[in-house]
Amino acid sequence: MTGSQQEDYERAGFGGRLTPGTSPALLLVDPARAYVDPDCPLYAGVEPAVEAMRVLLADARRAGIPVVITRMRLRPDGSDGGLFFRKVPTLRVFAEGSPYGDFIDGLAPRATELTVTKQYPSAFFGTALAAYLTSSGIDTLLIGGLSTSGCVRATALDAMQHGFIPVVVEEAVGDRDPDVHAANLFDIRHKIGEVWPMARVPEYLAGRGPQTP
């Protein structure tokens, strides 16, 4: 985005900031093989984001915060995907039994970490995620995953709407088109939550205190 666009958004009143709280969790959205296997139609060339996701996951585990990792899984006929499946029929790669729905190496949840299985873009829609986070006392979500314009954006929006401060970690999300990726990060930053460089995360996790935007 250009400087003039930034100035226009701020003049219009989109310059607010959310201050992350003291009880964060990490949410990795759909780290699926589909996005990194060149034989899959959903291959997105997001390997740098995947490497950053591995680092982010290691940071979260080292800090001892809750970890939630989502996956897309659909019935063979896609019927549980409803209109989403009808709109995006390539989602058939996430049908039960397809290897493309498996977790990327190094990004699978541990037995003590929550796996959320979903059929729609948001990790909150039709799942128990909000109840789990509320009962765990979580106030902030560090978000990485795929893809920026789809499931990451939808999840960040629903996080905000459920009262959890969304912090999208810039290097740890990716999309098949860099312009679409950048535009969605710009929009998330101005309308939904915070967008942080990954270098800021370890300091936040070490302090576990409110951060000044």
Image: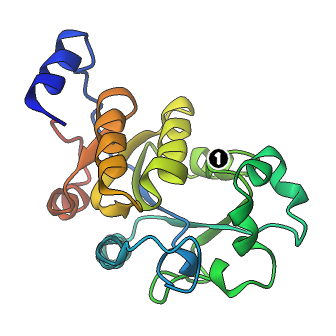
Location of mark 1 (residue): 124
Crowding at label 1, few (<14), some or many (≥20) Cα neighbours within 10 Å? many
Residue lying furthest left in this view?
Answer: 3
Identify the residue at image location x=36%, y=61%: 173
Amino acid at dot 1 = Phe
Say if 55 sits above or below 143 in the image: below
200 in relation to 50, above or below? above
Tally the numbered discs: 1
Report x, y in % for residue 36.
47, 80
Rendered image quadrant of residue 98: bottom right
Q: Is residue 137 at least partly visible in the picture?
A: no
Spot occupied by residue 35 in the image (x, y as percentages of width and height): 50, 74
Residue 18 appears in the rendering: yes
Residue at 37 percent across and 62 percent down: it is 174
Q: Position of residue 83 (x, y in %)?
A: 80, 44
128 and 85: which is toward the camera: 85
Residue 6 left/right relative to 172: left
At horizontal 74% and vertical 57% (from top left) the residue drawn is 119
Q: Is residue 49 left or right of residue 76?
A: left
Question: 86 or 148, which is in the foreground?
Answer: 86
Front-most of 44 and 96? 44
Q: Looking at the picture, how far across and down is residue 188, in whole percent?
A: 36, 37
Q: Quadrant of the N terminus?
A: top left
